[in-house]
């Protein structure tokens, strides 16, 4: 009985989506697909929980919630193997050695002869914009920290 109800609900939602697709713009279609996909994953999570597969039910439920909120799936967020977390592509290749003083000044957008107070203020301003906890890139945050360390003399 449960598969029949779930199948009918999915069919009804699909028919509603196809009916509205002809006159809808891309944003509305994407939002509808996100809702339908999250409902389907939620139904799968409920089915798996009823069957006793709580591990997979939790995974499907988490994916349904993330999809419903419009977030990337945890396995698509990137990381050390997948590049930076800001979605800006892979970071430039690592180079050996420390950042030069000239490069550090360019990173912090400072002129030669900047005081330690100006260096710390520029660092604070940039790190607030690029910190990974605020959705920025861990690579850029590390470069900004390295630039401050070079200029301050740590």
Image (cartoon, rainbow, N blue to C red):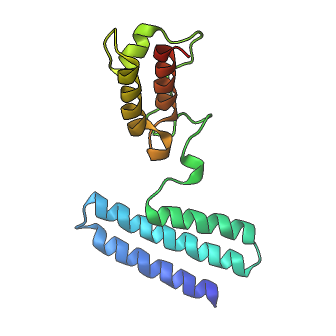
The image position of residue 88, as x and y in percent, is 43, 34
Quadrant of the drawing holding the N terminus: bottom right
The residue sitting at 22% across, 67% down in the picture is: 23
Observer-nearest of 78 and 107: 107
Q: Position of residue 7 (x, y in %)?
A: 55, 81
Q: Which residue is found at the position 40% from the left and 33% from the top?
A: 124
Pinpoint residue 95: horizontal percent, then vertical percent.
56, 13
Most distant residue in the left direction:
23
Q: Nearer the viewer, residue 124 or 117?
A: 117
In the visual, does 27 lie left or right of 50? Answer: left
Question: Which corner quadrant of the image does residue 56 belong to?
Answer: bottom right
Q: How many marks?
A: 0
Q: Residue at coordinates 46% horizontally, 66% vertically from top-left?
A: 68
Where does the C terminus fall, quadrant-wise? top right
User: Is residue 23 found left or right of 103 in the rendered image?
Assistant: left
Residue 123 vertical position relative to residue 35 in the rendered view, above or below: above
- Please, is residue 141 above or below residue 110 in the view? below
The location of residue 57, given as percent across then percent down, is 68, 70
In this view, the residue farthest toward the right is 52
Closest to the observer, 46 or 22: 46
- Against 59, is 135 above or below? above
Residue, x 51% and y 62% (percent of image)?
A: 66
């Amino acid at each position: 009985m449960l598969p029949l109800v779930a199948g009918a609900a999915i069919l009804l939602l699909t028919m509603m989506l196809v009916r509205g697709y002809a006159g809808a713009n891309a944003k509305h279609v994407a939002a509808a697909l996100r809702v339908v996909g999250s409902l389907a994953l939620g139904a799968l999570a409920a089915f798996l929980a009823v069957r006793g597969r709580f591990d997979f039910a939790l995974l499907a439920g988490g994916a349904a919630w993330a999809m419903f909120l419009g977030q990337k799936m945890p396995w698509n967020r990137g990381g050390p193997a997948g590049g930076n977390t800001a979605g800006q592509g892979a970071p430039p290749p690592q180079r050996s050695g420390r950042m030069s003083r000239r490069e550090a000044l360019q990173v912090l957008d400072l002129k030669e002869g900047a005081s330690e107070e100006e260096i710390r203020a520029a660092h604070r301003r940039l790190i607030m914009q690029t910190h990974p906890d605020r959705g920025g890139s861990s690579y850029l945050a590390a470069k900004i920290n390295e630039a401050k360390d070079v200029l301050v003399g740590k």
